[in-house]
Image (cartoon, rainbow, N blue to C red):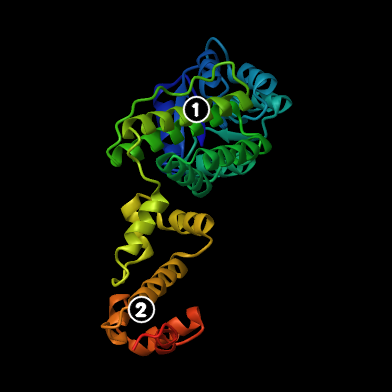
Amino acid sequence: MQVLIVDDEPVIRYGLSKMAETYSPGQMKVRTAVNGIEALRLIGEVEPDIVLTDIRMPKMDGLELCKAIHDDYPRIHMAVISGYGDFEYAQKSMAWGVKHYLLKPVTKSDVHDVLERLVKHSMRGYVSVTRYLHWVDRIEECVWSLHAEQLAQIIGQWQAECLSEDIPLARMKEMLGDCLDLLIERLQSRHYSLRLDRIDIRGCRADEMLMCFAGHLESIMSKLQTMRKGNFKDPMEEAKTYIDSRLSQEITLEEVACMVGLTPNYFSALFKKLTNETFVQYRIQKRMEKAKEMLAIPHYRISDIASEVGYEDYPHFTKTFKKIAGITPSEYRSELGVK
């Protein structure tokens, strides 16, 4: 959440800034300006969600600033700060959409109270941290796995949601830029070095900005593919090979996901989508296929076969085999004519 505090007195400006920062530590980004002219310049750059402004200031006072914000930035929510002698003057700002006032001397509880009210009005078009990180996770897995089609679907969904939420351009620019920064940081933790310029969206519409973002992701994927020089194996093929070679071991979904560089939840969903089986179903099926191969070899005891495919509990092996094959291991061996 972006907050701009406008006051020409350094001590008051600093105090208000610190009060605002303590309202929601880590989530409230506070900027300051000394008068209305500087405030409008900053608003043009970052378009904050909330503006707290003093009334009496040189060059451009608070009332003029509120009018300019009302005319050009209707999404911004405002509150004015005034002394008792200026209160009647401050009331004129109601014509420019101001509904909240702070009377000097201002306390921390005053600031927090007005921020609480303004934040509630500002939440439209605001993407929650949980939802944002979910998008980043999905994008990261698609990029790392070089799944261009799935990435295109995710970007399409994100575009639709961003546009339907009516997110302000400045906020969208910050969100998409932060997403790229976080993605690059995560790729670097996987030992993939990459430098990429921040998104330049000056003069861009929302749909153009999102297309630019998608282009950056495609560029990352292209560079990643070039770096691998064609030696990259599909993560699902790597996963299946890993499972197939360890049928006698009790490996976990989390272990296999980590091996191929995917999160467990994403790996589980992707594995089922591409194989039409869950991780557990696939492993059981492979174990039973290997058991059938070994049952065709006369010198193998059935108890040894059970152990070889990961079943120390012989009755459990027999029950599972019958569930898959329709007959017991002994009956299967008899049908093959193996004694």
Quarter of the figure with the C terminus = bottom left
**Residue 22 appears in the rendering:** yes
Residue 30's quadrant in the figure?
Answer: top left
Q: Quadrant of residue 287?
A: bottom left
Q: Amino acid at mark 1?
A: Ile
Task: Return the x and y of residue 64 as percentages of the image width and height.
Answer: 63, 16
At x 28% / y 71%, what residue is drawn?
A: 249
Outermost front residue: 337
Crowdedness near tag 2: few (<14), some (14–19) or many (≥20) residues, C-alpha within 10 Å: some
Q: Nearer the viewer, mark 1 or mark 2?
A: 2
Dot 1 alpha-carbon crowd within 10 angstroms: few under 14, some 14 to 19, many 20 or more: many
Q: Amino acid at mark 2?
A: Ala
Image location of residue 283, percent across then percent down:
40, 68
Q: Which residue is mark 1?
A: 5
Horizontal side of residue 20 vs 82, given as left or right: left
35 or 282: nearer the viewer: 282
- Does the residue at mark 1 contact the one at mark 2 (Cβ under 8 Å)? no
* Cα separation between marks 1 and 2: 80 Å
Up the image or down, 283 lies above or below 239; here it is below
Q: How many marks?
A: 2
Asked if residue 289 is positioned above or below residue 207 in the image, the reply reads below
Quick one: label 1 or label 2, which is nearer the N terminus? 1
Q: What residue is shown with label 2?
A: 296
Query: The residue tagged with tag 1: helix, strand or loop?
Result: strand
Which of the 4 quarters of the picture holds residue 9?
top left
Residue 72 coordinates in the image, percent (x, y)? 66, 19
Kindly give the residue lying farthest to the right in the view shown: 95
Q: Is residue 118 visible?
A: no
